[in-house]
Image (tube, rainbow, N blue to C red):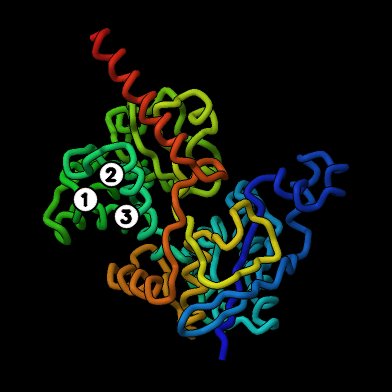
Amino acid sequence: MAGHFGFLLHPLEVSDVYRKIPAAKRVPPHWLEAIMPYAPVIYTSHITGIRSPYNEAEGHFVSVPLTPRLMMSLPEEKVLPKLVQAAKVAEKKGARIIGLGAYNAIVAGAGVKLAQALDIGVTTGNSYTAATAVEGALLGAQEMGIDPESAQVTVVGATGSVGRVAAILLARQVKNLLLVGRDGARLQALAEEVRYLTGLTPKISTDLHASLIVSDIIITVSNAVGAIIHPEDLKTGAVVCDIARPRDVSRQVAEVRKDVLVIEGGVVDVPGEVDFHFNFGLPPRQALACMAETMILALEERYDDFTLGKDYSLEQVEEITRLAKKHGFKVGGLRSFDRALTPDELESIREHARRRRAQEAAGA
């Protein structure tokens, strides 16, 4: 019997609505956002063709018509019922586990509140997201000739659920780890947890700019609703793996800093001839890791809750990574701002970094 899942989407900004519903362009952005809280959830597409050596799966995208700004500004009693409604739409289509995209997980209490309202499984996808983020960041470092053991490695948004696990995973592989967030007490508690689990004592900081400018490898996964990393923030030759949706890294970085490698974290190749019947900005047969985690659990016909809350275990991360390999999921190459990077482009970034370092040395 094929696995069956649902996944909840939402627009990252009003322009996403205009792109998907051209008729909406007649409505000014501020009016459209004012209307969105009253709009019904939207059944978006039927996902077919997911096939591993062990099983097949199908699923359903259902969209919640709220931007991150609305989700964070509206009271919970206005937002959570929409997520429940969207999950129920997928359940009626046959879904037996629900995955949460982007801010859907945040406003649902890291999935816990939605799980309490449903009779089927729920996962945020954060376990596989954290695992693929670390793998992608280290692949980027390899491309830039950076040795992770001697590099300054930084996690921005470290006290969030994905940031916490990424920090623990990195602490097993690097020697210089910096945890960045807004709450010093929570950062200190995380640093102590990392030390207890791995033996490495990371540094902590609440100063984003001062942390970024000295960092060689950065994983950023904040809950900000807009860009927080700008061209002047980054060290020459740095690698930034941006997992956040909306993005943490400003598009200006790609335009101005030709010496810096910015990659999208958590992009995964899906086994089979998957057809999402919906364009969410990735090439055919690729998905975000949070989506992939839901697919993997469906292929396994694991319909219990999986990654919920902020303190999920490393054992869960290791388990979903093992299951991903079993079913043929893998990190889908290096992408930057919605497109794959070619070998020539990667070499160009390396060359710009070499030139900039030479200029800095000459001016020192």
Between the C-alphas of marks 3 and 1, the distance is 13 Å
The amino acid type, in three-letter code, at marker 2 is Leu
Alpha carbons under labels 3 and 2: distance apart: 10 Å
Mark 1 crowdedness (10 Å alpha carbons): few <14, some 14-19, many ≥20: many
User: What type is the residue that disc 3 sits on?
Assistant: Ala
Residue 208: where, in percent of width, then height?
36, 33
Label 1 residue SS: helix
Q: Position of residue 299 (x, y in %)?
A: 49, 81
Viewer can see residue 82 = no
Furthest-left residue in this view = 199
At horizontal 42% and vertical 63% (from top left) the residue drawn is 330
Residue at 65% across / 72% down in the picture? 47
Residue type beneath disc 1: Ala
Tell me if residue 255 comes above or below residue 24 in the rendering.
above
Residue 287 visible here: yes
Q: Residue at x 33, y 29 (%)?
A: 237
Circle 1 residue? 191
Q: Are marks 1 and 2 in contact (CB under 8 Å)?
A: yes
Q: Which residue is mark 2?
A: 179
- Residue 311 sits in which quadrant? bottom left
Instruction: Identify the residue under disc 3.
Output: 166
